[in-house]
Amino acid sequence: MSKLLLGKPVADKITEEVKLEVENLKEKNIIPKLSIIRVGENPSDKAYERGALKRMEKSGIEAEVHLLSKDIEEDDFLSKLEELNNDKDTHGILIFRPLPNQLREEKIKYNILPGKDVDCFSPVNVAKIFEGDESGLPPATPAAVIETLKYYDIELKGKDVVVLGRSLVVGKPVSMMLLKENATVTICHSKTKELEEVSSKADIVVAAIGRDRMVKSNFLKENAIVIDVGINIDSEGNMHGDVDFEGVKDKVTMITPVPRGIGSVTTSILAKNVVKACKQINNI
Ligand code: NDP
């Protein structure tokens, strides 16, 4: 049986560090605050919101939810965003996506203030990830992958890493962040030829494809390390990763479980980003 890379200790460590930073800010009479914009009653948004609010409370960060009607016009949405961009008490803004069709993400992403964009929606923060510029606010899930690898002392320098998936949410940014850590990164997608063969050469495989347990034992070399980002819910409501955990667990040396893996680290990254934004806004 391989070593389980659990998310909780990683999230706890980040939260402890964030709490200390929040205490220091509070001594200067600065209270970090996250403002969440949620449009409608999407159950997965609400589930993430509950987790985020709990994490902010644990970290000493204030949080407020702005609930907007699912039929809201784009101009009204942009007015709310503008209000939060200008709100002196708000340091981080999180907008749940995807937004309903009448709200054009292609337009809205240019309107969120990059310095308050704690979920890497703004093209400015996306560009900073690609430039390796650490002044930006990194996306939560890719940053959770990197923090987990670091927490468990997994060397990245010179390692062959295969990333399965090339979305702007996970695959592409995590690949750039791994490259910054001096890994040799191969990005695979649905048109990649001989996927199993490419993947089975990697020291570390990061799976972010959104395909229930598709990554089988033949995708992995003996003693590989596996980071499973996938969240797939089956017809009975059970959560599975993109990796066939049962089928690979005796072949690999380390693996993140689903649930209790990467997904449990993301809200602590969000808290870390709120504090980073707050410090930058206050020139600390
Ligand atoms: P997307 O659907 O946006 O992207 C999936 C990527 O996987 C695409 O690049 C696609 O290739 C590739 N892909 C799909 N099928 C195959 C296949 N058969 N072989 C090879 N590549 C394939 O998903 P996301 O990136 O948003 O999310 C990926 C997974 O991570 C999902 O399970 C999602 O639920 C989960 N997730 C987890 C989070 C967490 O906090 N743990 C947060 C966000 C997402 P192509 O580009 O060619 O179409």
Image (cartoon, rainbow, N blue to C red):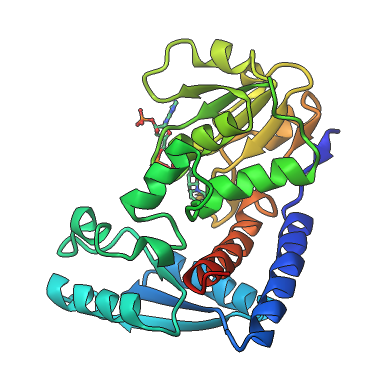
Tell me, yes or no, if residue 116 can be seen here.
Answer: yes
In this orientation, which residue lies closer to the viewer: 231 or 180? 180
Q: Quadrant of residue 265 in the image?
A: bottom right
* Position of residue 259 measured from the top left corner of the image (x, y, whole percent): 66, 53
In this orientation, which residue lies closer to the viewer: 233 or 181? 181
* Position of residue 27 measured from the top left corner of the image (x, y, whole percent): 69, 86
Q: Quadrant of residue 154 in the image?
A: top right
Most distant residue in the bottom direction: 29
Quadrant holding the C terminus = bottom right
* Position of residue 22 measured from the top left corner of the image (x, y, whole percent): 66, 77
Identify the residue at image location x=56%, y=64%. 276
* Position of residue 250 measured from the top left corner of the image (x, y, whole percent): 81, 27
Identify the residue at image location x=70%, y=25%. 157
In this orientation, which residue lies closer to the viewer: 105 or 275? 275
- 204 up-or-down from 255: above or below: above
Identify the residue at image location x=13%, y=74%. 75
Which corner quadrant of the figure contains ligand 1? top left
- 64 up-or-down from 277: above or below: below
Quadrant holding the N terminus = top right
Tell me, yes or no, if residue 211 can be seen here.
Answer: no
In this orientation, which residue lies closer to the viewer: 206 or 140? 140
- 170 up-or-down from 217: above or below: below
Horizontally, residue 17 falls left or right of residue 29, namely right
Horizontally, residue 95 falls left or right of residue 31, namely left
- 284 up-or-down from 173: above or below: below
Q: How many marks?
A: 0
